[in-house]
Amino acid sequence: MRDRLTIIKVGGNVVEEESSLKSLLKDFSRIAGNKILVHGGGKTATILSEKLGIESKKVEGRRITDAETLKVVTMVYAGLVNKNIVAGLQALGNNAIGLTGADLDLIRAAKRPVGEVDYGYVGDIKTVNYQALNELLNSGAIPVVAPITHDGHGQLLNTNADTIASELAAAMSYDFEVQLIYCFEKSGVLMNENDESSRINEINPEVFGELKANGVVSGGMIPKLSDGFAALNRGVGVVVITNPSGISEGLRGTRLVLE
């Protein structure tokens, strides 16, 4: 029987606000067994970009990354946000290590070709160095992964954190029973984003299509669900969208299923 691996992707207000991040890290530290934390930090990057006079643009929740924006997201994701999380986990007795895709050749990506949209320096993942992750986990380390990848030729690339979590989960599912948790400020996918009681308990691909067409699911939730279903299709056992309290309450939230 394979060991369990829990991969949590944290984003939204949870990673941006000190109190909510501390709460999440406490819940994360209580998870038994192997675990990996993947994080975003988009709001902080947007605020810093505005202060520097750099316009932020997104298409269906995915950031368009020109050369100046790449500098900002690298500083924010790989620097400020990543090291705050690592320090927080160390304070709780977790031997965390902060990584980008460039570290240990962890995640190689290719610059996305220009199509209807020019995403700039955005990377589409090609390979995951799961052996390096295995070695870190076996040593007792807890990887904390920032959403910066590289192309193997010295170019850093911005890659959606939801996609990174999905790709890591799929790659690690060969050796582990993986559960992938997307954690943000809401209790799950909501029919009414202002009403927590409207949480949808289960979503399959057909329902996802309907929710997207009706505008219930939009913006950053689209890549989250798309990447969640991609993970399920590649062998990941469990995918749940929830908030920090949902993690400590038996993965209460919205569960993605294939049928």
Image (cartoon, rainbow, N blue to C red):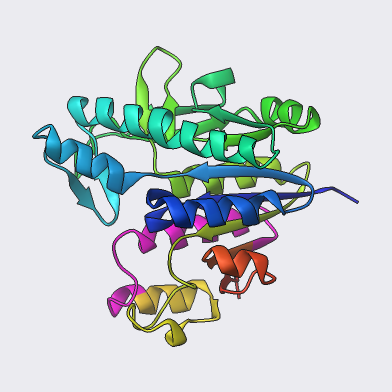
Q: Residue furthest top?
A: 153
Picture residue at 42% right of the left edge, 29% below the top: 78
Picture residue at 41% right of the left edge, 45% below the top: 40
Picture residue at 22% right of the left edge, 49% below the top: 58
Q: Position of residue 134 (x, y in %)?
A: 74, 31
Q: Position of residue 128 (x, y in %)?
A: 58, 31
Can see residue 111? no
Q: Residue furthest bottom?
A: 197
Picture residue at 37% right of the left edge, 79% below the top: 210
Q: Which is more toward the observer, 205 or 22?
A: 22
Q: Quadrant of residue 195?
A: bottom left
Q: Position of residue 251 (x, y in %)?
A: 65, 69
Above or below — where is 192 with respect to 145? below
Q: Quadrant of residue 250?
A: bottom right
Q: Which is more toward the observer, 18 or 184?
A: 18
Task: Tell whether 23 sits left or right of 219.
Answer: right
Task: Tell whether 217 sits left or right of 52.
Answer: right
Q: Position of residue 179 (x, y in %)?
A: 68, 56
Q: Is 217 included in the stretch rendered in magenta? A: yes
Can see residue 137? yes
Q: So how many labels did they put on this image?
A: 0
Q: Residue furthest right?
A: 1
Above or below — where is 131 with respect to 199? above
Q: Which is more toward the observer, 49 or 59?
A: 49
Q: Which is more toward the observer, 16 or 209?
A: 16
Q: Is 110 included in the stretch rendered in magenta? A: no
Task: Tell whether 56 sits left or right of 181.
Answer: left
- Magenta stretch, residue numbers: 212-238
Task: Tell whether 240 sits left or right of 34.
Answer: left
Image quarter (top left, top right, bottom left or bottom right) of the C terminus: bottom right
